[in-house]
Amino acid sequence: KNMEVLAPKGPSPTPQDVSMKEENLCQAFSDALLYKIEDIDIEDWENSQLCSDYVKDIYQYLRQLEVLQSINPHFLDGRDINGCMCAILVDWLVPVHSKFRLLQETLYMCVAIMGRYLQAQPVSPKKLPLVGIMALLLASKYEEMFSPNIEGFVYITNNAYTSRHRKPGIWMLNKKWNLKQQYYTGYIEREVLKVMRHKAKNIGRVNKNMTKLTTIKNKYASGKLLKISTIPQLNSKAIQELASPLLGQS
């Protein structure tokens, strides 16, 4: 016996081609047109993974989150741990990240998660490595196609922790900050200058062997990462001048 196929009565809608043609691609914000700023994402329109149609909205949303979820510069004041301990932890996490062959973005997210957790939750120095490892595990679940399992992280810590701990658990030198950079980053030069001064100061300390924490420099000295930490610009007069207002500070 034939079965009747139920379908809505009335004519079906006419199929329409809703794909975006190259000539119809437009920029999301009128400011870009007003100031004739080059659209740096326009050439990515054929790559669906790069989301060129939505990239400006995505970055605008991320900038809002950056404000809402910012870290207090003095979040370690009055805590049992200090900035030096956190620096040592990050210096240790870098080779761990490399050993697991994780993406660069995973390391960046790991440090971000770690900072936000430490801001909200007091932690003893003994448990600080656990915070770093769990931040790396969480970041890898966000960024990696295949995240390392918890047993791998337990092994890395020489079994100091077990799986039961889980649940509680450069601005271009010699160039001005121009309108295009301001538009795409959302920051004016004055807002990034303070951060860049501290970066320049830290670069100078590393280059002068004033710190034992050189893992990150060594990591970026590899050919795979274009030996970016060995470029002569990092020892240039521009770096020294940028750091000069902070020299003498610890």
Image: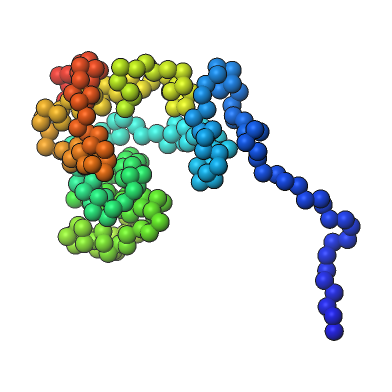
Is residue 103 or residue 39 the one in the foreground? 39
Q: Is residue 93 above or below residue 40?
A: below
Tell me what residue is drawn at x 52 percent, y 35 percent: 43
Image coordinates for residue 239, horizontal then vertical, percent: 23, 20
Image coordinates for residue 41, horizontal then vertical, percent: 51, 33
Tell me what residue is drawn at x 21 percent, y 48 percent: 95
Image coordinates for residue 3, horizontal then vertical, percent: 83, 78
Image coordinates for residue 245, horizontal then vertical, percent: 22, 15
Instruction: Please state if 203 lies on the left or on the right of 65 as rendered.
Output: left
Q: Image quarter for residue 52?
A: top right
Q: Quadrant of the C terminus?
A: top left
Tell me what residue is drawn at x 30 percent, y 20 percent: 173
Instruction: Please state if 226 lies on the left or on the right of 5 as rendered.
Output: left
Give the colour scheme shown.
rainbow
Tally the marks.
Answer: 0
Q: Quadrant of the N terminus?
A: bottom right
Q: Residue furthest bottom?
A: 1
Tell me what residue is drawn at x 20 percent, y 57 percent: 157
Instruction: Please state if 124 lies on the left or on the right of 171 as rendered.
Output: left
Q: Residue furthest right?
A: 10
Answer whether residue 65 is visible to the viewer in this image. Answer: yes
Answer whether residue 194 is visible to the viewer in this image. Answer: no
